[in-house]
Image: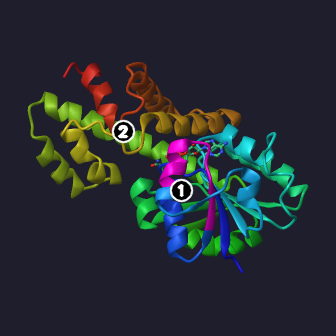
Amino acid sequence: GMSSVAFIGAGVMGRPMIANLRKSGFSVKAFDLSPVAVENLRSDGVEVAETLADAVEGVDAIVTMLPDTPHVQSVLLGDGGIGNILPSGMLVIDMSTISASGIQAIGEQLAKNGVELLDAPVSGGVKGAIGGTLSIMCGGSDVAFERAQPVLSAMGTTITHAGKLGMGQVFKMCNQLMVGVHIQAMCEAFALCRAQGADLDLLRNTLMGGAAASWMLENLGPQVIAKDDSAGFRIDLQLKDLRLAGEAAFEKGLALPGLAMATALYLEARAHGEGSNGNQAMFRTYDRLTNQ
Ligand code: NAD
């Protein structure tokens, strides 16, 4: 059975995900390059490995939760990476948001050694990571998806098999595209409402009861109205995800003007030094555009 997990990447998301794995009875060996992350793990009572090789020694499965494609490539295939030391039959679950073609290429390399890879990016933010209520979008073989169930259900409540390897990332990029466009729609409507001198709280409550209701309006609307730019999900990470969606669209020659526009607005925010703000802080861009 599945009882021990190596967890690589214990940042904002990884740390609470490790806590939930342990709560479900898994023994976890963690590894992270950052001294702050290591200190946090120690204070949580988590066993911290000194090297990647130590982390994966003797475990039943490996979870990676890293920033972007190059980090996952480096951990799994780079010099000092673990790709060549894993026993045949090992299951690797990458939960980072990275490129779909990138994870497919990594999977082809690992398959040469009999290692199975599942891509399993998540939605639900830090709140979902802490609560163990993440929506997890998986790509890979039926066998890999089944084997991963005990591990995934310790961290999430909605677990979807989107298709072959990379399709979890495809679902996730669609999610992020809609997140960007929905935030843009909300910020734009609020800018119009404010300029006309009408009440934003009342607007939000009214729209929540009709066809323009959205998760963004419900959860991030109050922060936008209060001009609260704190993160949450940082604009830098949102831009990374929109870039991944844009690259995937470009690969297929697709014109996706909504995606392009949301991306440009976030680039404007980052150009003003606002990359560490929460993604709801696109309202600052609209403040500038509308001189409010
Ligand atoms: P983070 O930057 O807080 O954590 C990443 C961790 O990986 C860091 O602690 C870093 O030190 C570590 N790391 C980097 N390279 C490493 C290496 N070679 N070996 C070991 N450790 C390494 O990021 P996060 O917010 O936890 O996000 C992780 C992934 O999840 C990203 O792809 C992100 O887009 C995605 N995601 C984040 C959220 C969110 O709300 N933060 C929500 C959904 C998905």
Q: Which residue is mark 1?
A: 122
Magenta highlight on residue 32: yes
Residue 96 vs 89, above or below: the answer is: above
Q: Which three-letter amino acid code belongs to the residue tagged 2? A: Gly
Point out residue 32 in the picture as x, y percentages from the top left corner.
Answer: 61, 48
SS category of the residue bearing label 1: strand
Q: Judge left or right: residue 166 versus residue 181.
A: right
Q: Residue shown at 52%/57% (left/top)? A: 42
Q: Residue shown at 51%/64% (left/top)? A: 45
Residues drawn in magenta = 28-41
The first of marks 1 and 2 along the sequence is 1
Instruction: Name the quadrant of the C terminus.
Output: top left
Point out residue 152 in the picture as x, y percentages from the top left corner.
Answer: 59, 68
Q: Is mark 1 within 8 Å of ligand 1?
A: yes
Q: Which three-letter amino acid code belongs to the residue tagged 1? A: Val
Q: Nearer the viewer, residue 15 or 292?
A: 15
Quarter of the image where one finds residue 101:
top right
The residue most toward the right is 112
SS category of the residue bearing label 2: loop
Q: Judge left or right: residue 269 versus residue 238.
A: left
Q: Which residue is mark 2?
A: 278
Point out residue 106 in the picture as x, y percentages from the top left corner.
Answer: 78, 48
